[in-house]
Image: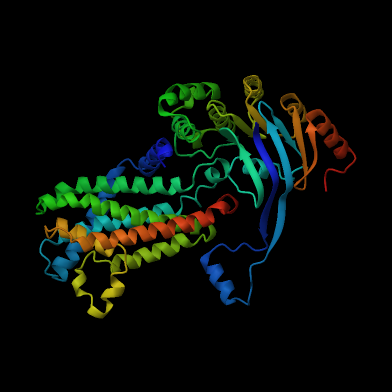
Amino acid sequence: MLEHREVIWILVKKDFKIRYRHSALGFVWSLLNPLSIMTILTLVFSLLLKSGVQNFPIFLLSALLPWRFFSIGTMQATGTIAGNPSLIKKIYIPRYLLVLTNNLASFISFLMEFVALLPIMMALGMTLTLHILLLPVIMIIEFFIVLGISLALAALSVFYRDFYQIWEIVLQLGFFLSPIFYDPNIVPEQYRFYYSLNPVTRIIESTRKILFYNTSPTTLDLASPLLIALLLLAVGYIVFRRLEPRFAEET
Amino acid sequence: MNVIEVEDVWKKFKIPHERKNTVLDAVASTLSLFGGRRSTFEEFWALKNVTFNVAERGSIGVIGENGSGKTTLLRLIAHVMKPDQGRINVNGRIAPMLELGLGFHPELTVKENAVVFGTIMGLKRDQLKGRIESIIEFAELRRFEDAPLKTLSSGMQMRLAFSVAVETDADIILVDEAIAVGDMEFRRKCLSRFKEFKKEGRTIVLVSHDMNLVTEFCENALFLSKGEIVASGDANDVVKEYVRRVESGLASP
């Protein structure tokens, strides 16, 4: 992978340019999206439903940002092979690089979003503590989760063109099945196990511990998503390698 | 040492009778929901038992009727596809010019595309700057260097692809009908660049229907028909055989 670092860097830059080329506001759009969701959900939950969570905007944003990286990262990567027939058919480049660089571009967007929203979150009453030093670790673990899933999705959607739509539905359900706008403790005990199978659950909880509860995630909070991440990465990579020889014929 | 070694290569394609490539289709045909339709397909051998070598400093022309497997062969050499059987060895860096283009991105500018594909083809960052200039110069696209690629005519895009391919120090250049596009002036420029390549001892694999080109640039040639080698060896002889077959109506099915 090191021998490809220049190609990786150029492809990440290319992805980035394409993402933000078509809007004058560019990056601002990717801030307006979480801010508008935050506003509407805060209105619904604090004012209408009186959920009782103190400082709901922070509670929400601390979960919404990692969720956005998960959903945008995997969605964008789904079409990297199937949507690029001219590249796949005409020139050889290790194909996993296309998925990896797409994920990296999403990751950088995520970091930028986070940095840009940090002052807003602080203005809304978040206190910055040293626990935040653990945040990069959680972000990197999430990156591996996204990469593993993306590899499988990108490869499978070459052969099944409706994978994109299927994944869109999964993500929609995932939004409600992840502790984004509610506390996971409201999930009934007998469903907890199934609930925790969602790979982003613990990522969200750990991020929320740092940004909202001002505590550090436990070792288990880090170890279990790391384990899931490595597992997903292995599965994604195997699926990708198995299907790769026929990419040029099927795109 | 050989630059390209192709040994007993077979390549198969599936021609689906009815294309099924959604999960919905797959589930439906497994469950036989809609009257038990199953996806059926024909197998088609695009290349059969193809063996040849290209020696160092050598060049080879590939000729044959449409659908004879020429492009498939180039794709296999370019590593874009994998053979079902057999072995392909390539010693050196390849600049592929497959089907008129490199897979540029239409939203990026001429310059940005040149940077992306120059890098993919192995140019290092410190080489890139000077090379981009000569790529744009050669393609005669100076005025358009900051225009998105989609605003260029297909001939202009072609020129850019060609320029990137020739400016990247590749040892082997795969040319698939590429120079057929482009105006006469550009074509002349390309051909003289090919001559330089030959002098430098680089390898050209040329797929063309222009027999004069083949005999001019390649000492050897390969005549494919329905995926099999009909004749190979000295380019003049192979071209003669091809012309003889076409004239007697043997080459086309």
Question: Quick one: which residue is furthest to the bottom in this view?
Answer: A190
Q: Position of residue B134 (x, y in %)?
A: 50, 21
Which residue is rendered at x = 71% and y = 32% of the image?
B60
Question: Quick one: which residue is furthest to the right in this view?
Answer: B248
- Quadrant housing residue A204: bottom left
Which residue is rendered at x = 29% and y = 56% of the image?
A68
Question: Quick one: which residue is furthest to the front in this view?
Answer: B1
**Residue A251 appears anywhere in the view:** no
Image side of residue A235 versus residue A173, left or right: right
- Quadrant housing residue A159: bottom right
Q: Position of residue A234 (x, y in %)?
A: 41, 58
Which residue is rendered at x = 17% and y = 67% of the image?
A45
Which residue is rendered at x = 21% and y = 45% of the image?
A116
Q: Position of residue A145 (x, y in %)?
A: 34, 57
> Which color mode does the image show?
rainbow
Image side of residue B30 versus residue A38, left or right: right
Q: Nearer the viewer, residue B250 or A116?
A: B250
Q: Quadrant of the N terminus of chain B?
A: top right
- Residue B171, compared with residue A153, is above or below; it is above
Image side of residue A27 versus residue B51, left or right: left
- Residue A42, compared with residue B101, is above or below; it is below
